[in-house]
Amino acid sequence: FGQAVVRVEEVSARADDDEAVDAQGAYGERPTRSMQVSEYASWWRDRGKGALLYLKDWHLTAEFPDFNAYTPPAIFSPDWLNEWYDHKRAGSDDVTARDYRFAYIGPAGSWTSMHSDVLRSSSWSTNVCGVKRWTLVPPDATWALTSSTGRGIAPLLRTGCGESVDSAQFCALDIARAASVVVIQQPGETIYVPPGWHHSVENLTDCLSINHNWIHPSGAIDSVRLLLAETEAAAAHIEDVRLMVSASEFDALVDRNVAMNAGMGCAEFRDLLSRAEELAKHAAENAGNDGDDGFVHELHARWAREARELLLSS
């Protein structure tokens, strides 16, 4: 894998340095760079006291399909999200059609700030080695993570974080802390993150992990509701250009912005749902006399159809 090019995030503030954590900014705002895995391995061997480098979002499965890096546990299936990207990638070199299956390599002290997952998907993560601390906040307490301006999320929830810059900026963090769940994940353990749960992750030791976002049929309707809200917000944001372009051009601009913000636009998600319904119907037909399997596949097909109809009617 030495020649593979990966994205590396610069972590200048270690997770146990509360003041520096506050100053480093929100999720996705850290400096990043691209480097070969061999270069990252050299840094790992010789690392000193400077900024930590956190290898994140490595599309190991998509880039090396013949390696068969891992098989998802059966409980985390079906996976409509990655099945769609596998379908798009088949016979194509399109790098935009990779997947949401990642390898992460992080040194002790590196961390990922509070966030929720793409398209309101579920996720699961397995520690191959190392120990992580997860802090998870349920959806009904998300408001307590938000700054007084409504434009920021507290990076971490430990006492001290979010307070050294301005205690009034995140005035409801005690409520978020009370609602939160903290999990220490040991080597070989897998954690499941439900849709819409904000979470932060700290590497307490050097860690190698598999991180996998997925959309279960029962969660597709939640993804649609998110996309509809993103569509409304995107349209309002560019309302001033509506009269300058045709209706179809305006809709395309809106959908492009939704895709940039949410990870996928409404048009593509409709295609994903159409394919999911088709596959579920086919699986139901092939279930034969196995009544339980046939019923489950028919239910999945119905969920796909209902989610697509909601998307089309809005």
Image (cartoon, rainbow, N blue to C red):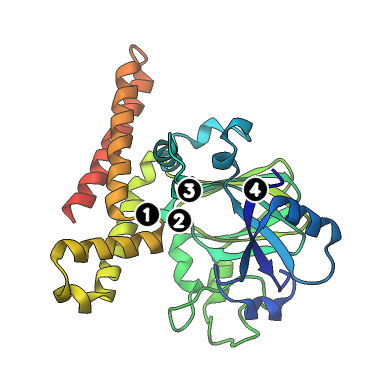
299 shown above or below 25: above
What is the crowding at mark 1: few (fewer than 14 residues within 10 Å), some, or many (at least 20)? some
Q: CA distance from mark 3 to mark 2?
A: 18 Å
Q: Determine whether, in the image, residue 69 is placed left or right of residue 234.
A: right
Q: Earlier in the sequence, mark 1 or mark 3?
A: 3
Residue position marked by numbered label 1 in the rendering: 264
Badge 2 vs badge 4, beta-carbon distance below 8 Å: no
Mark closer to the chain start, 4 or 1: 4
Q: Which residue is mark 2?
A: 118
The three-letter code of the residue at mark 3 reads Val
Which percent across, then down, holds residue 149? 44, 83
Badge 3 local density, few (<14 within 10 Å), some, or many (20+)?
Answer: few
Distance in Å between CA atoms under marks 4 and 3: 13 Å
Q: Amino acid at mark 1?
A: Met
Could you tell me if the residues under marks 2 and 1 are in contact, i.e. CB atoms within 8 Å? yes
Determine the secondary structure under disc 3: helix
Measure the alpha-carbon separation of dots 2 and 1: 9 Å
In the rendered structure, find residue 95 and report the number of the disc placed on it: 3
Count of marks, rendered view: 4
- Dot 4 or dot 3: first in sequence order is 4
| Nearer the observer, 84 or 199 | 84
| Element marked by disc 2 | helix
Q: Is residue 71 above or below residue 41?
A: above
301 relative to 213 in the view: left or right? left
